[in-house]
Image (spheres, helix red, strand yellow):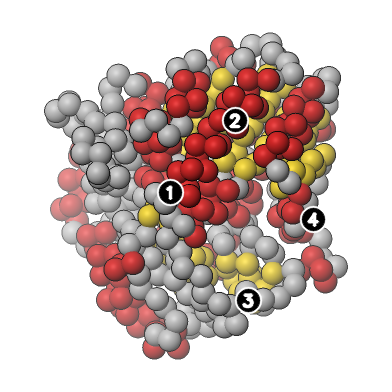
Amino acid sequence: MRECQCHASLSLFASRASPACRVPIVCASETRAKWITNRVRQSGLYWAAGLDATAGPARRPGLPSDPSRRLDRRITVRPHESAEQRVLQAVRFGDEQPTWIRPSYDGFGIANLPWSLLAALGGEPQGPPVSAEVWPQQLAAGVEAVLLLVIDGLGYRRLQETMAEGITPAIARLREQAAWFPLTSIFPSTTAAALTTLATGQPPARHGLVGFTCYLREFGMLSNLLFWTPLGKFPSYASQGLDPRAFLPVPTIAELATGQGIDCVAVAPEAFRETPLTRMHSAAARYLGYRTAGEFVALVHRALAEPGRRLVTAYWDTIDNLGHFSGPDHPATLTELRQLDRLLVEELLARLPRRDVLVVLTADHGMVALDPAREHRLNGLPLLERVMVPPGGERRAVYWYARSEEREALRQELLELAGEDGWLASGEALLSEGLLGPPPHHPEAAWRVGDLVLIARGGASFPYDPPGVTPRPSFGAHAGLEAEEQLVPCLVWRP
């Protein structure tokens, strides 16, 4: 066994390969590792040092008894909600990080959802679907159409809170008629990586879009994967004649479905029609672009009204935008959630043009409210002299590309910088332990993730602003492993 390249007390990963497995990355303390192994054997469950589900009354995640507290930081288990309980048991990160979630790629994550939808339409999945322990197979009987609603940035805990507080009452009523459980996002829990996983059913380490920004050896520079540009204010690689679809090495669900006689439609903002990311994800789908909320509803209804088997994916991005630049708890964000609640349930779903449709509401990731007192700005720090290129990733999951002779010095300085606000591990360790998905991996995955990865804890952040880019204040962010950013809703409903 090898020693983790980070704080010994923070280096715990839980392996879920078998009840008798050993923790693959170990602390310096062999005694601690043996204790964890024994606990896993005794429990018969596949997470490290699980918590006692019988200890006291369970509390709903995100719904503390004191309404002035927005977050109940510790993950709890509700025995009376077996689907949620099963997911939380499967994805618990471990006692060392009790508020973190380990992304699932084997039945409890958004990587599995596309395969369940393809199977519901009679297609042939090419990856593991959502686990039968939580997926409502009975709802898929007689399905000829699937409507996948992707609400960017809408976390499971956040939606639980808003339903309890009366902000999203229509979705709360719909939940009583539907299957309801959380899924995990991926790591890093960010839009470019997560939407690509929803579009392909593949994890980031396989499809290659491993974050917001990363080093691309193909172009020899740090690049923005969301816009497919060099980092900074530059035109996209597509504008230089390069094909975004050729950059993605795996087939999309739309391509697989179309090849099996299933029509695919993407309903998304008109402004996104020709973006490189859209061209990667929706090359085999018919794109319907909306400009207003009313047009969004009308286009989804139009897509569903057409005959034959069809997969309609509808994407809404305002919750994520407001979460970043106003804050997840800001009145503007709450107002937007109220309006979205009415739009989805009272306008869109109340007037569906067919009954043989399976409706699934989910998100790509959630959102963490940032603490300004825990912001560690990277610009101008002397440690930047130890890297080959500027930091990649983003403020809650930072990729570091060290000069070979400077790696150990960089590691020590990052540990000092992070303190209790960050968790540092090698990129190699994160890949080998499957945090970005199981093998086979993209051949460039290790280069893109880098030598070291700094993951923020709680409301901390480590922003870096590239030269020439005017920084914007951010009140909410994601990409890390906190439950608020990792858990997303999965609501499955038949009209």
The nearer-to-camera label among 3 and 1 is 1
Label 1: how many residues lie within 10 Å, few (<14), some (14-19) or many (20+)? Answer: few
Tell me the distance, in whole angstroms, between the alpha carbons under discs 3 and 4.
20 Å
Tell me the distance, in whole angstroms, between the alpha carbons under discs 4 and 2.
26 Å
- Name the residue beneath numbered marker 4: 274
Query: Dividing the image into 4 quarters, which one contains the N terminus?
Result: bottom left
Q: Residue 217, located in which quarter of the rendered image? A: bottom right
Label 4: how many residues lie within 10 Å, few (<14), some (14-19) or many (20+)? Answer: few
- Locate residue 5, reporting x and y percent: 33, 67
Disc sitting over residue 232 in the figure: 3
- Name the residue beneath numbered marker 1: 331
Q: Earlier in the sequence, mark 4 or mark 2?
A: 4
The nearer-to-camera label among 1 and 4 is 1
Tell me the distance, in whole angstroms, between the alpha carbons under discs 1 and 4.
32 Å
Secondary structure of the residue carrying numbered label 1: helix
- Name the residue beneath numbered marker 2: 344
Q: Earlier in the sequence, mark 2 or mark 3?
A: 3
Give yes or no for contact between labels 1 and 4 (Cβ–Cβ under 8 Å).
Answer: no
Secondary structure of the residue carrying numbered label 2: helix
Question: Is 82 positioned to the left or the right of 490 in the image?
Answer: left
Disc 3 residue type (three-letter): Gly
Question: Is 136 positioned to the left or the right of 88 in the image?
Answer: right
